[in-house]
Image: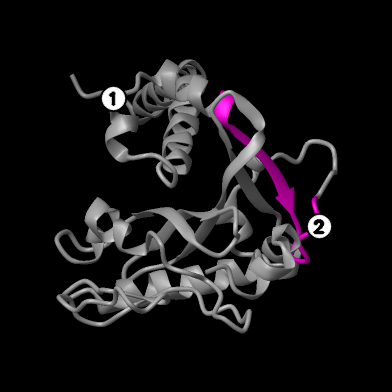
């Protein structure tokens, strides 16, 4: 039997309301789990700049959280390097992707501090978040500096949509390991950072500011270079404030 238009409209409206309530209820139930998963992934990326991916993979979520709580502290600074002490602002809550749209002087810059095991007063490295643009979409990462505030101790890189087998290789350990031991300042104290070169298969072991590139992924590599140079510039005030006079000029 053919239904009237009013029946169809009422039926559709009721069905829409029911489905909307179900979706809303699911979001309420699953929301906290999703936020916990996002927070856990962020902690893994931060820790990935100072410990190996294998160590992190071997940890349960509970172990990751405990390791993070006992070995990482954090602060938030402004473009000058001064710490921001405004109530409610924490490094974990700063959304660097959202801040990326603001002028540099209006952003908040999180800093994560890696401490020695069993000694929260002893700092082993400082970890700086970064965010930028690759070939197709956003790229981001965390760069760890040793306590000389010049030598790279580790880096993690991630992406939203780079090409598999090409730009997406920035997530590979063997690509990220190229940065370890490189310097961000030259001997005069100028911020040079580290530049991924075009092409692959060359050796830059004697050059403190160059690493091998990725074949067929020049644009992604340039995105990483731009991101690293920009964010080390944003953090330069803080980095130099934490450096000894000698390290600020040249930590060799």
Residue 80 on the magenta segment: yes
Residue 43 on the magenta segment: no
Residue 93 is left or right of residue 226, and the answer is: right
- In magenta, the rendered stretch is 70-83
CA gap, disc 1 and disc 2? 37 Å
Give the secondary structure at mark 1.
loop
Residue 161 visible in the shown view: no
What's the residue at 65%, 49% (across, down)? 110
Residue 238 image point, x, y percent: 72, 60
Labels 1 and 2: the sequence-earlier one: 1
Q: Is residue 244 above or below residue 95?
A: below
Residue 138 is left or right of residue 3, and the answer is: right
Q: Is residue 42 above or below residue 205?
A: above
What's the residue at 18%, 66% (across, down)? 166
Query: In which quadrant of the rendered image does the N terminus lie?
Result: top left
Give the secondary structure at mark 2.
loop
Place residue 236 in its image quadrant.
bottom right
Residue 120 visible in the shown view: yes
Pick whichever, 23 or 2, lies toward us.
23
Residue 215 image point, x, y percent: 16, 74
Q: Is residue 99 above or below residue 43?
A: below
| Residue position for label 1 | 58
| Residue position for label 2 | 82
Place residue 122 in its image quadrant.
top right
Give the crowd class for mark 2: few <14, some 14-19, many >=20 residues within 10 Å. Answer: few
Residue 195 image point, x, y percent: 39, 77
What's the residue at 74%, 54% (across, down)? 77
Instruction: Specify how the rendered protein is coloured.
Output: one colour
């Amino acid at each position: 039997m053919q239904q009237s238009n009013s029946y169809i409209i009422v039926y559709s409206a009721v069905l829409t309301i029911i489905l909307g309530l179900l979706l809303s209820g699911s979001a309420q139930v699953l929301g906290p789990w999703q936020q916990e998963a996002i927070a856990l992934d962020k902690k893994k990326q931060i820790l990935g700049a100072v410990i190996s991916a294998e160590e992190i993979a071997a940890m349960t979520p509970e172990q990751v959280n405990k390791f993070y709580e006992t070995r990482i502290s954090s602060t938030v600074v402004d473009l000058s390097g001064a710490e921001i002490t405004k109530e409610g602002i924490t490094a974990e809550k700063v959304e660097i992707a959202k801040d990326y749209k603001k002028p540099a002087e209006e952003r908040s810059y999180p800093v994560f501090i890696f401490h020695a095991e069993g000694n929260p007063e002893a700092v082993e490295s400082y970890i700086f978040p970064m965010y930028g643009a690759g070939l197709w979409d956003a790229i981001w990462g965390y760069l760890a500096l040793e306590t000389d505030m010049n030598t790279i101790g580790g880096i993690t890189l991630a992406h939203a949509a780079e090409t598999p087998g090409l730009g997406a290789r920035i997530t590979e350990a063997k690509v990220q390991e190229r940065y370890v031991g490189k310097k961000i300042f030259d001997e005069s104290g100028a911020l040079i950072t580290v530049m991924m070169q075009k092409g692959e298969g060359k050796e830059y072991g004697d050059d403190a500011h160059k690493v091998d590139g990725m074949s067929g992924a020049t644009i992604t590599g340039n995105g990483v270079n731009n991101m690293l140079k920009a964010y080390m510039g944003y953090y330069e005030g803080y980095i130099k404030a934490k450096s000894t006079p000698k390290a600020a000029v040249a930590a060799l």
